[in-house]
Image: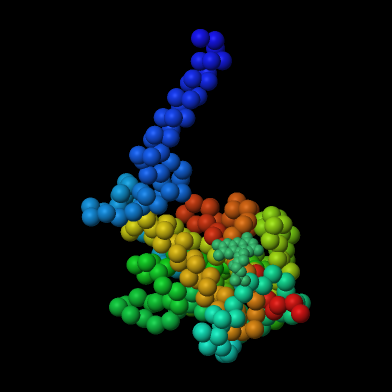
């Protein structure tokens, strides 16, 4: 047989073996394999069942950062049913700044403390095992009485911790890859997840929970924005390393999941 004939035969064999395998095994690419291996059956998780990682504190803290207490929040104006009905993604924003009470309402509704039960401070979004892996960073460009800069929402005492003062529009524009660069919004929220807060208990299945929880926080923000007369859009397409770099997280234990510009809709 000529060399090229052999190569063709080898390729055909490889393809047919590959096809047969994919009929038998449930998953070949990482997405379906991840879902399969993190599925439970009667004996537990189907993949490797390791509770890994260290115990991570419930609250991330920037100890030396200057703090701004979030003031009494603006009242919410709409019923949940109306907010759900009216909600839509907004991608163009007016020049109007947000007030601190509006930002306060938005963050407290997103994932703020609510009531304490069983000795655990609960939040507005549900969380597997009440481990609360979500963190929220705020890039404030136009908020009345708040210096422009990057802040961390400190859930434990409802405050903003200043990480970097100054205008971050250029870095943000680069990080969203110009695909969805709604950087003219007065506020830009970065939702990240501390995966290591949940993997100690749930192993890799914890990743599933974290993605679900990001969705719950995101919808809280959509609905509260609607109630305050604001608009937002969730941006999933961004350059991960660039956004992680912007908020100085490692992209492994903690990584950016979603971005949400917020502001008054343009006329
Ligand atoms: C996980 C996720 C990622 C998204 N990523 C983007 C994005 O990168 N850019 C964008 O313009 N919209 C993005 N969207 C918004 C959707 O395009 C929008 O929700 C959809 O078109 C429905 O429109 P509505 O929100 O106005 O109902 C995303 C939505 C979700 C849920």
Q: How many numbered discs sit on the rendered protein?
A: 0
- Image coordinates of residue 106 in percent, x first then y, are 57, 79
Seen from this angle, which residue lies furthest left?
A: 43
Scheme of image coloration: rainbow
- Image coordinates of residue 128 in percent, x first then y, are 37, 67
Q: Residue sitting at 56 percent across and 75 percent down? A: 221
Where is residue 86, by image quadrant? Answer: bottom right
Q: Is residue 73 visible?
A: no
Viewer-closest of 85 and 199? 85
Q: Is residue 48 visible?
A: yes
Horizontal arrangement in the rendering, residue 178 relative to residue 77 (left or right): right
Viewer-closest of 227 and 244? 227
| Quadrant containing the C terminus in the rendered view | bottom right
Viewer-closest of 236 and 61? 236
Q: Quadrant of ligand 1?
A: bottom right
- Image coordinates of residue 165 in percent, x first then y, are 68, 67
- Image coordinates of residue 205 in percent, x first then y, are 37, 56
Q: Residue sitting at 52 percent across and 56 percent down? A: 255
Q: In this view, does 133 lie above or below 97?
A: above
Q: Residue sitting at 52 percent across and 18 percent down? A: 7
Where is residue 222, by image quadrant? Answer: bottom right
Viewer-closest of 8 and 32? 8
Q: Is residue 3 above or below residue 245?
A: above
Seen from this angle, which residue lies furthest top?
A: 1
């Amino acid at each position: 047989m000529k060399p090229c004939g052999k190569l063709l035969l080898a390729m055909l064999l490889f393809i047919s073996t590959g096809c047969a395998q994919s009929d038998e095994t449930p998953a070949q690419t990482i997405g379906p394999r991840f879902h399969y291996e993190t599925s439970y059956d009667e004996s537990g998780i189907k993949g490797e069942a390791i509770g890994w990682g260290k115990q991570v504190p419930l609250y991330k803290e920037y100890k030396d950062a200057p703090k701004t207490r979030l003031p009494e929040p603006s009242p919410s104006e709409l019923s949940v049913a109306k907010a759900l009905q009216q909600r839509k993604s907004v991608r163009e924003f007016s020049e109007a700044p947000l007030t601190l009470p509006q930002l306060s309402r938005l963050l407290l509704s997103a994932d703020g403390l609510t009531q304490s039960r069983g000795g655990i401070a609960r939040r507005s979004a549900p969380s597997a095992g009440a481990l609360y892996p979500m963190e929220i960073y705020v890039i404030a460009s136009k908020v009345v009485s708040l210096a422009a800069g990057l802040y961390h929402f400190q859930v434990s005492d409802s405050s903003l911790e200043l990480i970097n003062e100054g205008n971050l529009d250029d870095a943000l524009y680069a990080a969203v890859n110009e695909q969805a660069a709604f950087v003219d919004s007065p506020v830009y929220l970065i939702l990240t997840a501390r995966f290591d807060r949940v993997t100690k208990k749930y192993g890799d299945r914890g990743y599933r929970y974290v993605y679900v929880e990001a969705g719950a926080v995101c919808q809280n923000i959509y609905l509260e924005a609607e109630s305050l007369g604001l608009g937002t859009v969730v941006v999933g397409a961004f350059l991960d390393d660039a956004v992680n770099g912007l908020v100085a997280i490692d992209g492994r234990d903690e990584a950016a999941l979603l971005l949400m510009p917020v502001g008054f809709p343009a006329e």
